[in-house]
Image (spheres, helix red, strand yellow):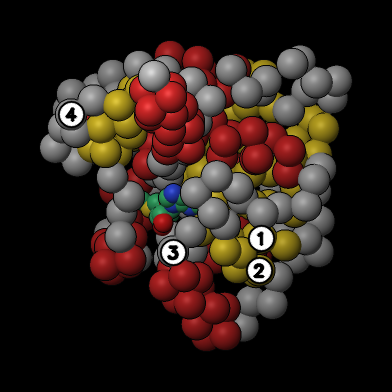
């Protein structure tokens, strides 16, 4: 009897430790997935540091038009921006010159990525870039400190999207924006693995669940959605 209760408690604790407070379920992983399901979506595997060369590929401008992303971000010179899941810092270093009186906080969980960003910071002499080591659940940003959080091709691979989302919301200033770039999940012609794409409906469902307001989706990019959310001035939750 005691043994059975003990075992049940142990299983429950392990489940909540691994899968959060009932936000997640687990299934057999599909190809490129981790088998963990959040709001009906299987989470994808993380892109490793070996992909740095791919993230920095010279034809990225032609394929994904990051220069158009910069125009659409409408950055102010003194903005504090958090590039979450910054990877090699490809977007970090496009944004940093646009916020000369502000800064870009480049957050990633892979120390190798942050080391690469440090190297690039020296090479490019870009002092307003701060690499930050996050955890799988926490962006490690000061509360109410960020004007814009941007997540480029990263959110779908967060192993703890709920906790990460809540931590990002905490870091945003009231009225601060969250911009997500995700490969278009509705479009089968986008040549990206299915778990690395997201639909507008799914992104909205997940962002609204953490109290963000949907502002708009701008579809000016060749293969990605550009989705804008805002942290309410008065919290919704
Ligand atoms: C596909 S890369 C995209 C990198 C970059 N945004 C770009 O578009 O060039 C996704 C990045 O998200 C990072 N990542 C995964 N989970 C994370 C988490 N919980 N917090 C911060 N970064 C995370 C990975 O380490 C990886 O560097």
Q: Which residue is mark 1?
A: 104
Tell which tag, 3 or 1, sits nearer the viewer.
3
Point out which mark residue 28 bears: 4
Q: Which residue is mark 2?
A: 130
Q: Is residue 181 above or below residue 125?
A: above
What is the secondary structure assignment of the residue under circle 2? Answer: strand
Q: Earlier in the sequence, mark 1 or mark 2?
A: 1
Q: Distance between the Cα atoms at labels 2 and 3?
A: 15 Å
Which x, y percent locates residue 70?
56, 49
Q: Nearer the viewer, residue 223 or 33?
A: 33
Q: Are marks 3 and 1 in contact (CB under 8 Å)?
A: no
Asked whether, in this view, residue 176 is left or right of residue 209, the answer is: right
Structural crowding at the residue carrying mark 3, measured as other residues with C-alpha within 10 Å and reported as few (<14), some (14–19) or many (≥20): some
Residue at 43% in and 29% down: 6
Q: Earlier in the sequence, mark 4 or mark 2?
A: 4
Structural crowding at the residue carrying mark 2, measured as other residues with C-alpha within 10 Å and reported as few (<14), some (14–19) or many (≥20): some
Q: Is residue 7 visible?
A: yes
The quarter holding residue 144 reads top right
Q: Distance between the Cα atoms at labels 4 and 3?
A: 26 Å
Asked whether, in this view, residue 215 is left or right of residue 205, the answer is: right
Q: Are marks 1 and 2 in contact (CB under 8 Å)?
A: yes
What is the secondary structure assignment of the residue under circle 4? Answer: loop
Q: Earlier in the sequence, mark 2 or mark 3?
A: 3
Q: Earlier in the sequence, mark 4 or mark 3?
A: 4
Q: Distance between the Cα atoms at labels 1 and 2?
A: 6 Å
Q: Is residue 1 above or below residue 174?
A: above
Which x, y percent locates residue 132?
61, 64
Does ligand 1 reach within 8 Å of label 3's beta carbon?
yes
Which x, y percent locates residue 199?
36, 21
Residue at 18% in and 29% down: 28
Asked whether, in this view, residue 182 is left or right of residue 67, the answer is: left
């Amino acid at each position: 009897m005691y043994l059975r209760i003990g075992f049940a408690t142990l299983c429950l604790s392990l489940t909540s430790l691994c899968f959060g407070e009932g936000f997640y379920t687990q299934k057999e992983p599909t190809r490129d997935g981790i088998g963990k399901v959040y709001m009906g979506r299987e989470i994808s595997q993380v892109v490793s540091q070996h992909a740095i060369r791919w993230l920095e590929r010279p034809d990225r401008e032609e394929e994904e038009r990051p220069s158009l992303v910069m125009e659409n971000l409408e950055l102010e010179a003194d903005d504090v921006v958090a590039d979450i899941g910054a990877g090699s810092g490809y977007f970090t270093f496009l944004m940093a010159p646009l916020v000369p009186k502000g800064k870009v906080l480049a957050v990633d969980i892979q120390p190798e990525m942050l080391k690469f960003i440090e190297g690039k910071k020296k090479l490019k002499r870009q002092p307003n870039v701060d690499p930050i080591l996050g955890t799988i659940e926490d962006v490690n940003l000061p509360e109410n400190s960020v004007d814009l959080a941007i997540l480029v091709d990263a959110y779908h691979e967060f192993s703890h999207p709920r906790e990460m989302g809540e931590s990002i919301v905490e870091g945003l200033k009231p009225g601060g924006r969250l911009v997500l770039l995700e490969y278009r999940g509705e479009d089968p012609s986008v040549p990206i693995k299915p778990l690395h794409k997201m639909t507008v409906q799914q992104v909205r469902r997940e962002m609204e669940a953490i109290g963000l307001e949907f502002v708009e989706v701008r579809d000016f990019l060749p293969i990605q959605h550009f989705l804008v959310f805002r942290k309410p001035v008065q919290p919704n939750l």
